[in-house]
Image: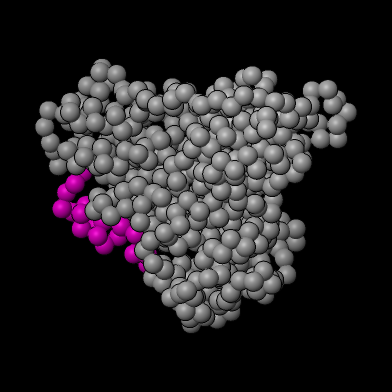
């Protein structure tokens, strides 16, 4: 039987390494999706295209592989756009297979400007142009996703999809070698590190493959180690780790970063969240940024030196250029304080629980003690999000999935779905607010159908909490953002999940029983949280508005 373009595209992608494909199948993407499955990919049918894009994004973040999404033409793509936007803004290597009306179908109900949609959100738009270029076009889109860390929408016109085409074997074009910093830049940074008394490294998503190299360099020059929020866990277990820099930083981490005389950002953008709107880094500190993208240097925060280069290879070169070693910031006093004050759970607080509502800090600490260490935590957006992000520990950067570049609520459950499939040996934890959970609840059916033993923790304040705390103090009416109490546990049971409603510590006993196993079905925990004040990170964010 003669192969079609759809068959060739599916076979090519499977050959390049597409192992999981997320999507909702319609007539336009039916054949290419089945071709992927025939050639060995696993298809994960979500309930909404937005969930598919978000799950693929999370799968890519946790697995280190390219995320793949397949959608119907027009409305399938528009449904997926929020997830695609998050991926594009996060520079997630992701490929969106988007069916497209034939060029001749000018009056098709499905016709929208798919190129413009991709460009509008920062994604790359590409296309399979002709049957004889199907393999080359597909490989080019894949290479862009991998080599440039971009989200690519590959449009598949229906008339071309059905045309006969010759299969081909993709050439090995995907050995992407990233450049290290120049010799001059390496020498200059080595000199700065040699002279620094209180150096701090802040590693971002662009440094996730560089833990060993950065730790070795930091040890030699006495630097303390921090990460951006998306890279949380990169230095887990290192005694000199400050955890996350920025709005999520502990008081001690903020103090130590603020007192640094040299801050080196490795693959981190130093955006307003990582630097507390620029206020976290001391005015007298020398700031260096190392990034593969020249446009990223100084884009969010002033830098005294911008270095174009890959974090891992550049760190190796700088270590080799150091003339010696120094203790730097790694003093006995700092070590003792990190041991006593280094985690948010070490920071004293007044419990706001009232018998009907549990303090989110208390609940998060109790959950952290209940859950196995091998976990992957995916966090939705909202007033609540600092509690699971900072009070639930993770074993490494593969244990934390933070889809916040677009600041959309409703992505947490689908993020946890993708993360769970990328790390099947870990307990998946979805941390959501009630608003985001209900917005993305369709994927609870997907989680249940796939038999994933996922813990879904809903920080439920019966409101869009960020808006309550943003506008409430000024006396604005809040009826548009406050809702009647909802029994989320009952809704979860309707999906076939186990569930518990938690108002105080003792209500967590069913969660402990579920964690003990066998965890054949997901469990949803409806945390009725106290909501009398904004989260600390939100207070910090409001000061920047």
Residue 437, visible in the rendered structure? no
- Residue lying at the far front in this picture: please name it: 1
Q: Nearer the viewer, residue 439 or 63?
A: 63
Q: Quadrant of residue 451?
A: bottom right
**Considering only vertical position in the picture, is 386 above or below 364?**
above
Measuring from the top left, give residue 487's x and y in whole percent: 68, 73
Total marks placed: 0
- Residue lying at the far left in this picture: please name it: 324
Range shown magenta: 328-354
**Considering only vertical position in the picture, is 382 above or below 526?**
above
- Is residue 351 a member of the stretch shown in magenta? yes
Q: State the residue at coordinates (49%, 33%).
A: 16
Relative to 274, 459 lies left or right: right
Q: State the residue at coordinates (61%, 30%).
A: 8
Q: Nearer the viewer, residue 512 or 271?
A: 512
Measuring from the top left, give residue 280's x and y in whole percent: 39, 42
Looking at the rendering, in which quadrant would you find the N terminus? Answer: top right
Colour setup of the view? one colour
Q: Quadrant of residue 516?
A: bottom left
Residue 492, visible in the rendered structure? yes
Q: State the residue at coordinates (60%, 51%).
A: 44
Looking at the rendering, in which quadrant would you find the C terminus? Answer: top right
Measuring from the top left, give residue 350's x and y in whole percent: 44, 71
- Is residue 521 a member of the stretch shown in magenta? no
Q: Nearer the viewer, residue 51 or 167?
A: 167
**Considering only vertical position in the picture, is 329 above or below 311?**
below
């Amino acid at each position: 039987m003669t192969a079609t373009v759809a068959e060739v595209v599916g076979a090519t992608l499977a050959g390049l390494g597409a192992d999981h494909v997320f999507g909702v199948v319609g007539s336009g993407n039916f054949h290419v999706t089945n071709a992927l499955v025939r050639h060995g990919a696993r298809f994960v049918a979500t309930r909404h295209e937005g969930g598919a894009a978000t799950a693929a994004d999370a799968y890519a973040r946790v697995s280190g592989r390219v995320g793949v999404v397949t959608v119907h033409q027009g409305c399938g793509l528009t449904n997926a756009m929020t997830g695609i936007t998050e991926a594009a803004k996060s520079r997630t290597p992701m490929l969106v297979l988007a069916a497209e009306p034939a060029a001749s179908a000018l009056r098709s109900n499905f016709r929208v400007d798919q190129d413009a949609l991709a460009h509008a959100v920062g994604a790359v738009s590409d296309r399979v142009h002709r049957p004889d270029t199907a393999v080359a076009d597909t490989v080019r889109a894949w290479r862009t996703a991998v080599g440039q860390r971009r989200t690519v929408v590959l449009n598949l016109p229906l008339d071309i999809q059905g045309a006969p085409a010759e299969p081909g074997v993709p050439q090995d074009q995907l050995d992407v070698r990233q450049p290290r910093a120049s010799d001059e830049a390496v020498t200059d940074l080595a000199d700065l590190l040699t002279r620094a008394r209180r150096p701090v490294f802040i590693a971002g998503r662009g440094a996730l493959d560089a833990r060993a190299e950065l730790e070795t360099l930091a040890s030699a020059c006495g630097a303390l180690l921090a990460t951006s929020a998306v890279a949380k866990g990169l230095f887990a277990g290192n005694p000199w780790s400050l955890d996350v820099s920025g709005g999520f930083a502990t008081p001690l981490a903020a103090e130590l970063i603020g007192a640094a005389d040299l801050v080196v950002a490795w693959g981190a953008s130093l955006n307003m969240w990582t630097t507390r709107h620029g206020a976290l880094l001391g005015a007298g500190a020398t700031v260096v940024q190392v990034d593969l993208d020249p446009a990223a240097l100084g884009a969010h925060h002033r830098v005294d030196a911008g270095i174009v280069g890959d974090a891992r290879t550049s760190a190796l070169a700088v270590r080799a250029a150091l003339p010696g070693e120094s203790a730097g910031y790694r003093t006995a006093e700092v070590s003792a304080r990190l041991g006593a004050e280094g985690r948010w759970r070490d920071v004293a607080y007044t419990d706001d629980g009232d018998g009907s509502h549990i303090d989110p800090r208390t609940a998060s600490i109790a959950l952290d003690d209940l859950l196995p260490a091998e976990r992957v935590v995916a966090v939705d957006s909202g007033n609540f999000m600092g509690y699971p992000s900072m009070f639930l520990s993770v074993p490494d950067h593969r244990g934390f999935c933070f889809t916040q570049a677009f600041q959309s609520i409703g992505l947490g459950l689908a993020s946890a779905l993708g993360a769970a499939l990328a790390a099947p040996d870990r307990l998946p934890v979805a941390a959501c607010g009630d608003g985001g959970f209900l917005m993305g609840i369709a994927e609870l059916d997907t989680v249940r159908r796939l038999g994933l033993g996922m813990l879904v923790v809903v920080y439920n304040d019966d409101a869009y909490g960020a808006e309550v705390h943003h506008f409430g103090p000024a006396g604005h009416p809040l009826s548009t953002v406050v809702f009647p109490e909802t029994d989320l546990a009952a809704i979860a049971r309707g999906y076939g999940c186990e569930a518990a409603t938690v108002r105080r510590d003792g209500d967590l006993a069913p969660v402990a029983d579920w964690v003990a196993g066998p965890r054949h079905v997901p469990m949803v925990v409806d945390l009725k949280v106290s909501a009398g004040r904004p989260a600390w990170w939100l207070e910090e964010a409001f000061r920047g508005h």
